[in-house]
Amino acid sequence: MSKVVGIRFRKTERPFYFDPKELELAKDQAVVVETEKGLELGWVVMPPREVVPAESTESLPPILRKAAQEDAACRNELKPKEEHALTVAREKARALALPMKFVEGHYTLDGRRLTLYFGAEQRVDFRVLLRQISDTLSVRVELRQVGARDEAKFTGGVGRCGRLICCAAWMCEFAPISVRMAKEQALPINAEGLAGQCGRLRCCLKFEYEQYVAVNRLLPRINEMVMTPLGEARVIIGHPLKETVSVILAEERVRELPMSQITRVNAPRRQNAPPPPDEEANETRQAAH
C-alpha cells in the first residue's frame, strides 16, 4: 500500500495526485508542490489515503511543504503581473494582426514561468509573438490554445438561468452534448435557445437527459389510444415533469391523468426514442461542428 493525496490548483480543474510523504494534511490545507513547470500553490481536496500501487513504476511527485503566509502573499502579488502580461500579449497580438483572444495568464509560484491561454478559430503561427512577449516580460512564456468551452470557463459569465455558468462554477470536465438531448426534453431547436456563452450546445442539456429518456419511454405518443378509468381516450400531450398525460375523452372532454391510471393498448416504439450508439455519436459530432 502507498499513500496519495489529491491536490487541486483551480476550482474547476480536476485534482492531481501527489505523495504526501510524512505530512499530516487535512482537507482544504494549502500546500506547495513541484510540477513540471515549477512551484505551484494548491489545496487538498482528498486527504491522504492508502491505495494499491499501480503497475506503473513511475512514482508520484512529492508535496514539498505546507503553504505558509508568505506563499499566499506571493500568490497575491503575482495577480497584477498576470493582468499586465495579458495586456502586453493582447497589444502585441493586435500589432501583429493575429486572430487570438487571450483569456487567462498564470505565473508559477516562483515567478519563473508564465502560461498564457488564448482562443482562436484556427491554428495560429505565434512564434514571433512568443519571442516578443518573452523579451518584454523577461520570463519564460508558454502560449496554449484552448477551445471555445475553455474560453467560457476562464472568462466566466451568467447563464440563461441567472447563475454563474456551470463550467466556471464547478464543472471539471466537459461531456459530449447532442441535439437529441434537447429533442428528448421537448426544447425548441434553435441556435439562440440552445447555445451557451461558448457558442456550443449548453452543458445543462445533459443534466436531466437520462431522467427525460426514462419518463418519455413510459409516456404514450400523441394521438395514441389508451384506456383510462373514464373510458377509452386519445392522448393529446404528455407532461414528463409531472408524469401525467392529457387525454381527450368522449364528448370532447379533456382530462389530465397520472400515468398510473393509463393503460396503453398498443405501445409501438417511439419515433424519437434514443438512437443506437453509433447514430447518437454521429449526432454529437455534427452538433460539435
Image (cartoon, helix red, strand yellow):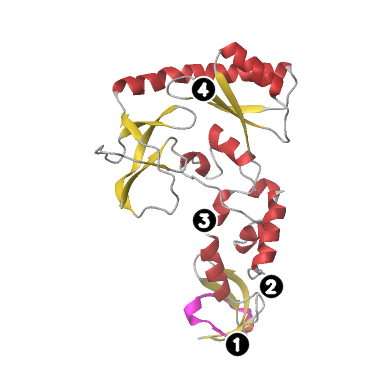
The 10 Å Cα crowd at callout 3, few under 14, some 14 to 19, many 20 or more, is few
Q: Residue 20's quadrant in the figure?
A: top left
Q: Which mark is residue 206?
A: none
Disc 3, SS: loop
CB under 8 Å between discs 2 and 3? no
Q: Which mark is residue 207?
A: 3
Which mark's residue is nearer the viewer, 3 or 1?
3
Mark 1, residue position: 265
Which mark's residue is nearer the viewer, 3 or 4?
4
Kindly report the distance in space between the C-alpha atoms of the residues bearing marks 1 and 2.
Answer: 17 Å
Q: Earlier in the sequence, mark 4 or mark 2?
A: 4
**Where in the figure is residue 85, as x and y percent of width and height?**
56, 18
Is 259 covered by the magenta stretch?
Answer: yes
Disc 2, SS: loop
Q: Is residue 242 above or below residue 78?
A: below
Report the amino acid beneath label 3. Phe
Q: What residue is shown at x 35% (from left), y 19% (from top)? A: 73
Which residues lie in the magenta part? 252-264
The 10 Å Cα crowd at callout 2, few under 14, some 14 to 19, many 20 or more, is few
Q: Which mark is residue 271?
A: 2
Q: Is residue 230 above or below residue 193?
A: below
Q: What residue is shown at x 65% (from left), y 21% (from top)? A: 130
CB under 8 Å between discs 4 and 2? no
Report the amino acid beneath label 2. Gln
Report the amino acid beneath label 4. Arg
